[in-house]
Image: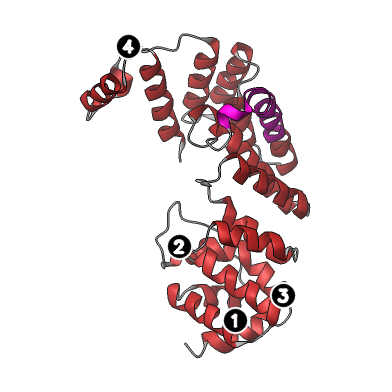
Amino acid sequence: MNKQQDKFMTELTRLLESQNFQSEEEMEKFLNDLMGKDISSFKNKPSTNKEKAQDLVYEAYDLTPAIAKKKIEKALQLDPDCIEAYEYLGDTEESIQKADAFYEKGIEIGRRLFCGEKYNEYKGYFWGIVETRPFMRCLRDHAEILYLLGKKKECVEIFEEMIEFNPNDNQGVRDQLMLYLIELNEDSKYEKYFKMFKNEDKAFSLFNYALYTFKKEGDTLKSKKQLQKALKQNKYVAKKILSALPIVELAEYYGIGDENEADYYVSYAQPIWWETKGAIDWLKKYSTMS
């Protein structure tokens, strides 16, 4: 979800909270009347320092770096606990170590605000609640940096925690989590999440399961069938893995079975396929036959 969508959800939440509905029917009628209207046109200006800080961060993403930095500084003056501001600083920092420090600050604040006494109010809905989304994004970015820094087990721990926070996994961290569990030989954990997110007809799930099956039992009828199923789902993946050329750019969106989906999978999985003993020869054997 991009920042414009987040901004929309924030404005909608503020608007609904300001209405003092007496019933669900009243709220439903209000929402129906909103259809097709510009929410920002309603007089619903930020009333707290927290809301003002959030709006400054939303504005910053559309400004030049110098002006944006002033907006972020002002946001943190208004609300030192503005996770969105630390997320912005992480997103715009070139050094991954410095970026990670900002994400960790956002996570520290999020744990204090959402994982203490109020945890039971948020558990299971950490993506459904707009307030906790910046915290979840900081967690994901932090996890990805941990992996890049070679801290793979720590990365996996963060992803597992994110699924505990939000079992629906709207951010799709299960894709990387299950791939990294294969890499780390965490078979029991892989099986756990495979059962949790079964029957997903996409490249990440199918190629992950094919690789897992091959790594566990070798070139068997079962692993062959899993690989053939994956190859049928996305015809681009095998060629891109076998080329050994890194994927340098990802599209913002992809469709099931298309080349953008293949790029998304291969950008994460290619090194793991190459590092898995026998996997490349196995992939080459069956991809040329299909």
Q: Around disc 4, counting alpha carbons within 10 Å, would you say few (fewer than 14), some (14 to 19), or many (20 or more)? A: few
The tag earlier along the polypeptide, 4 or 3, is: 4
Circles 1 and 2, Cβ within 8 Å, touching? The answer is no
Looking at the rendered structure, the kind of residue marked 3 is Thr
Query: Which residue is depicted at the point 41% across and 63% down?
Result: 256
Query: Are the residues tagged 2 and 4 within 8 Å (C-beta)?
Result: no
Q: How many marks?
A: 4
Mark 2 or 3, closer to the camera: 3
Query: Which kind of residue does numbered mark 4 sit on?
Result: Lys
For the record, the magenta segment spans 102-122
Measured Cα–Cα span from mark 1 to mark 3: 14 Å
Which structural element holds mark 1? helix
Instruction: Give the residue pinned by disc 3.
Output: 276
Query: Badge 1 local density, few (<14 within 10 Å), some, or many (20+)?
Result: many
Quarter-of-image position of residue 233? bottom left
First along the sequence among labels 1 and 2 = 1
The chief SS type of the magenta part is helix
Q: Count neighbours of disc 3 (C-alpha within 10 A) and say few if under 14, some if 14 to 19, many if 20 or more.
A: some
Q: Position of residue 43 (x, y in %)?
A: 32, 11
Q: CA distance from mark 2 to mark 3?
A: 24 Å
- Under mark 1, the amino acid is Ser
Q: On the image, numbered disc 1 is attached to which residue?
A: 223
Q: What amino acid type is highlighted by mark number 2?
A: Asn
Q: Position of residue 229 (x, y in %)?
A: 48, 77
Residue positioned 50% across, 46% down in the render? 170
Mark nearer the viewer, 1 or 3: 1
Which mark is in front, 2 or 4?
4
Q: Which residue is mark 4?
A: 43
Taking the magenta stretch, the answer to whether it contains residue 242 is no
Tell me where residue 234 sits by quadrant. Answer: bottom left
In the displayed structure, does residue 128 sit left or right of residue 89? left
